[in-house]
Image: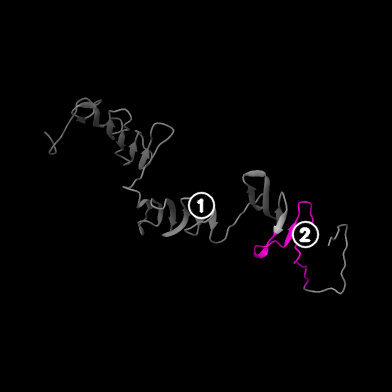
Amino acid sequence: SPDVKLQIINSDATQNILSLANQNSASHSFDFGRIVSTGALSIQGRQTGYNDILLAPTSGNVGIGTDSPGAKLEINNGSTQTELRISVTGDTGYSTINFSDASDINPGQIYYHHQQNLMNFRTNDNDRMVINSSGNVGIGMTSPAVPLDVEGKIRSTNDNSGSYLEMFNDGDVSGNSFIKSTSGELIIESAADITFSPNSTEKMRITSTGDIELAASSRIVLDDQPTASTASGSGTIVK
């Protein structure tokens, strides 16, 4: 007494209901069945390396390679590496992941531009960050020219030890330099000399020994010119 146009009932609950096989090799078949304990629909591949696909009936979760998906789509390759691939035909076009809500189908996006080999991140329908083919990261811009290129302000906050910007010399930690702010005090630290080069020309240098050197054309100008020059302390003025 079938209830629909085609109804298949298997009296053995341990066996799959329907199998689609290659004429020359049963090992290339796909078996369709029902997991008795959960009522889930299962699609199983007999060939080694084929992952099972499972549809949980109560949650609607889909599992690939797992029989207990915990999210709407869960993929498990049964090893330490699982791959999700989004591809296009040829070497142009975009691969895109859209994040949608009730008012907008794609306010957030991650897309890869295959022809330019760059990845773009969008929030609130605007480009926010890009990684170009050279690995340069641009924030607030689309054409970063250096490893980190920012259009706008950069903020560093550390409540415990103060904020700082640390710079390394070719990865050598022993030659690093700092610009720090601690308790409102600005601190500049360097493993070598500190130079000041307005208009791309060096005008003043503080050496690693603490000497202050001015370029030949540089002067010290005071807004309130004193009537006499005075100097005090144990340092030396060298002309």
Q: Look at the image and give the residue range highlighted in magenta.
A: 196-222
Q: Is residue 124 above or below residue 97?
A: below
Q: Is residue 196 above or below residue 19?
A: below
- Tell me the residue at 47%/54% (across/down): 130
Q: Nearer the viewer, residue 135 or 238?
A: 238
Write down the quadrant of residue 125 in the picture.
bottom left
Q: Nearer the viewer, residue 31 or 151?
A: 151
Is 173 left, or right, of 53 in this rendering?
A: right
**Local secondary structure at mark 1:** loop
> Is residue 209 highlighted in magenta?
yes
Three-letter amino acid code at the position of disc 2 = Glu
Is 179 left, or right, of 40 in this rendering?
A: right
Q: Earlier in the sequence, mark 2 or mark 1?
A: 1
The x, y position of residue 49, in whole percent, is 33, 30
- Give the CA separation, mark 2 to mark 1: 36 Å
Circles 2 and 1, Cβ within 8 Å, touching? The answer is no
Quarter of the image with the C terminus in it: bottom right
> Is residue 201 highlighted in magenta?
yes
**Local secondary structure at mark 2:** strand
Within 10 Å of the Cα at label 1, are there few (<14), some (14-19), or many (20+) other Cα atoms?
Answer: some
Three-letter amino acid code at the position of disc 1 = Asn
Residue position marked by numbered label 1 in the rendering: 136
Q: Is residue 18 visible?
A: no
Q: Nearer the viewer, residue 30 or 170?
A: 170
Is 222 left, or right, of 128 in this rendering?
A: right
- Tell me the residue at 88%/72% (across/down): 228
Q: Is residue 145 visible?
A: yes
Residue position marked by numbered label 2 in the rendering: 213
